[in-house]
């Protein structure tokens, strides 16, 4: 095994392979235990395997750690990771901690941790990469960085004191919102809230959209009203409406008053619909253009990087105005159809004449059958005056069909399980669709 010193922050995202070269997952953290007089000992890695499940891989099963990859014996326990007492996550819990130099030269903040092998399967922390407080008043200035051995410093973070999450956020900056949400849900509760509070508004909004409602409410409760309203402004209107619906009526109304008026209006409209109707499932931000818009203009709108794939699959064509509720709805043009026509072709001439919109009070059962029957990823929603008010996308329907805890529910291929409530809902909505949850044990051997 390599005896090279390895910095933990550089391991995050590295691929884990078995001896045959097959990919097992990606490293998300390193787990250590403190010792009385010696530096903390590495006990294993926290690895994310397919399905966004985090599992524990003992350091004794790691045969090689090199640049960009980790080789294991191939034998891993696929039970969901559960942190035990005395164990500390380097990335999630050590980075950002304050340490004091034993020589009295001041304090610093931990930015990275180096581990090294001292024997077969015996790894320990040997060095810390720390940053001293800045000495200049300039907002661009940074403190000096220092390499320090474990015995040269002692931890200073007091019990109950907030721990900086800046370095942790930087380490996870490349994660997709769903992966970051999964990672935060695996953190100790206090640490999860610390990280959430330091995330930028738009990043936190994306993460909240991928979390179960109970955690959404818990995090929002930690934010002051102005910050909470800013985050809600950044969320998709349908997700913001679902979250506000979980709050007390008083706080929900107060946050709506603090939100941007146009965003609040969309959310209020969605809150007026029953959750099991097209109005309750839809999003109010589809692509909407006039009949005179060209194929080139439509494709340019679809290219926007912030646009969800399901919303980019089709463009809605209406009479003015072009904000929901629009003028009279004329039809949709599918992305694939646009590719068959020259850039100057007007969208009004290539509408899908066979797709009928649904009304806002259409049941989720009917919406799901339309999506399944016609192989669609979205269906337009109109009001009684045939004005477009939104679209229901396939992910909206899946969110409704899946059990409430689907984001955190483990998947064990050997033990299929379908909660009774979810099964009956799925059968009522789409008899040919099945929703499967899986059961697994917690802990590790």
Image (cartoon, rainbow, N blue to C red):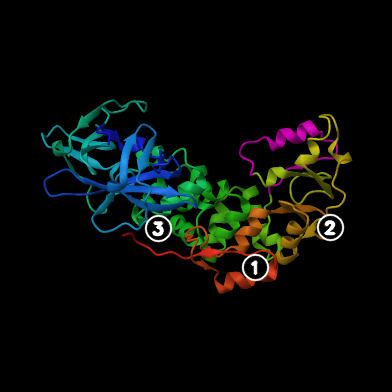
Dot 2 surroundings within 10 Å: few (below 14), some, or many (20 or more)?
few
Position of 350 relative to 159 (above/below): above
Which residue is rendered at x = 60% and y = 50% of the image?
A: 236
Q: Residue at x 51, y 46 (%)?
A: 177
Sequence-wise first label, 3 or 1: 3
Sequence-first tag of 1 and 2 = 2
Mark in front: 2 vs 3: 3
> What is the distance, in whole Å, between disc 3 and disc 1 at their CAs?
27 Å
**Does the magenta portion include 236?**
no
- Magenta range: 285-308
Q: Position of residue 362 (x, y in %)?
A: 75, 64
Q: Which quadrant of the rendered structure holds the N terminus? A: top left
Residue at the (62%, 62%) spot, across then down: 400
- Image location (x, y in percent) of residue 247: 52, 63
User: Compared to 164, does 382 lie above or below?
Assistant: below
Secondary structure beneath disc 2? loop
Residue 305 picture location, percent across and down: 62, 36
Does dot 3 land on a helix, a strand or a loop?
loop
Residue found at the very far front of the displayed protein: 20
The reply to whether the C-beta atoms of the residues labelled 3 and 1 are less than 8 Å apart is no
Between the residue at mark 2 and the residue at mark 3, the CA separation in whole angstroms equals 51 Å
Q: Point out the frontmost of discs 1 and 2.
A: 1
Residue situated in front as seen by the camera: 35 or 18:
18
Q: Is residue 127 above or below residue 354?
A: above
**Local secondary structure at mark 1:** helix
**Does residue 64 appear anywhere in the picture?**
yes
Q: Quadrant of the C terminus?
A: bottom left
Task: For marks 3 and 1, give the one nearer the viewer.
Answer: 3
Task: Check residue 80 in the rendering and tell me which mark sits there, or answer none.
Answer: 3
Q: Which residue is mark 1?
A: 426
The residue at which mark 2 appears reads as 385
Please count the marks in the image: 3
């Amino acid at each position: 095994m390599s005896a090279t010193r390895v910095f933990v922050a550089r391991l995050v995202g590295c691929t884990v392979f078995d001896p045959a070269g097959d990919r097992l997952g990606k490293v998300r953290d390193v787990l250590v235990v403190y010792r009385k007089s010696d530096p903390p000992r590495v006990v294993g890695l926290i690895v994310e395997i397919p399905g966004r499940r985090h599992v524990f891989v003992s350091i004794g099963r790691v045969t090689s750690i090199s640049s960009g990859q980790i080789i294991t014996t191939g034998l891993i326990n696929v039970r969901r990771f559960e942190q035990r007492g005395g164990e500390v996550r380097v990335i999630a819990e050590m980075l950002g901690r304050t340490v004091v130099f034993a020589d009295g030269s001041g304090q610093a903040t931990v930015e990275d941790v180096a581990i090294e092998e001292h024997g077969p399967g015996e790894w320990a922390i040997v060095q810390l990469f720390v940053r001293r407080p800045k000495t200049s008043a300039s907002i661009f200035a940074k403190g000096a960085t220092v390499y320090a051995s474990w015995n040269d410093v002692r931890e200073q973070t007091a019990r109950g004191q907030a721990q900086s999450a800046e370095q942790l956020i930087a380490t996870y900056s490349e994660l997709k919102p769903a992966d970051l949400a999964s990672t935060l849900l695996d953190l100790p509760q206090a640490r999860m809230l610390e990280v959430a509070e330091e995330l930028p508004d738009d990043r936190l909004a994306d993460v909240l959209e991928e979390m179960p409602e109970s955690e959404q409410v818990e995090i929002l409760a930690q934010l002051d009203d102005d910050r909470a309203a800013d985050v809600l402004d950044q969320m998709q209107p349908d997700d913001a409406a679902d979250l506000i619906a979980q709050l007390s009526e008083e706080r929900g109304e107060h946050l709506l008053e603090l939100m941007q008026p146009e965003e609040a209006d969309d959310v209020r409209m969605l809150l007026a619909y029953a959750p099991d109707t097209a109005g309750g499932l839809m999003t109010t931000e589809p692509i909407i253009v006039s009949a005179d818009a060209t194929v080139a203009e439509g494709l340019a709108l679809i290219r926007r990087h912030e646009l969800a794939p399901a919303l980019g699959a089709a463009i809605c064509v209406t009479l003015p105005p072009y904000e929901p509720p629009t003028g009279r709805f004329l039809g949709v043009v599918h992305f694939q159809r646009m590719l068959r026509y020259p850039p100057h072709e007007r969208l009004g001439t290539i509408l899908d004449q066979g797709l009928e919109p649904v009304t806002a009070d259409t049941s989720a059962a009917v919406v799901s059958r339309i999506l399944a029957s016609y192989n669609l990823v979205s269906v337009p929603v109109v009001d009684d005056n045939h004005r477009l008010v939104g679209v229901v996308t396939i992910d909206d329907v899946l969110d409704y069909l899946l059990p409430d805890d689907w984001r955190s529910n483990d998947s064990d291929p050997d033990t299929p399980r379908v909660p009774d409530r979810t099964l009956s809902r799925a059968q009522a909505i789409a008899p040919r669709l099945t929703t499967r949850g899986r059961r697994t044990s917690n802990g590790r051997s």
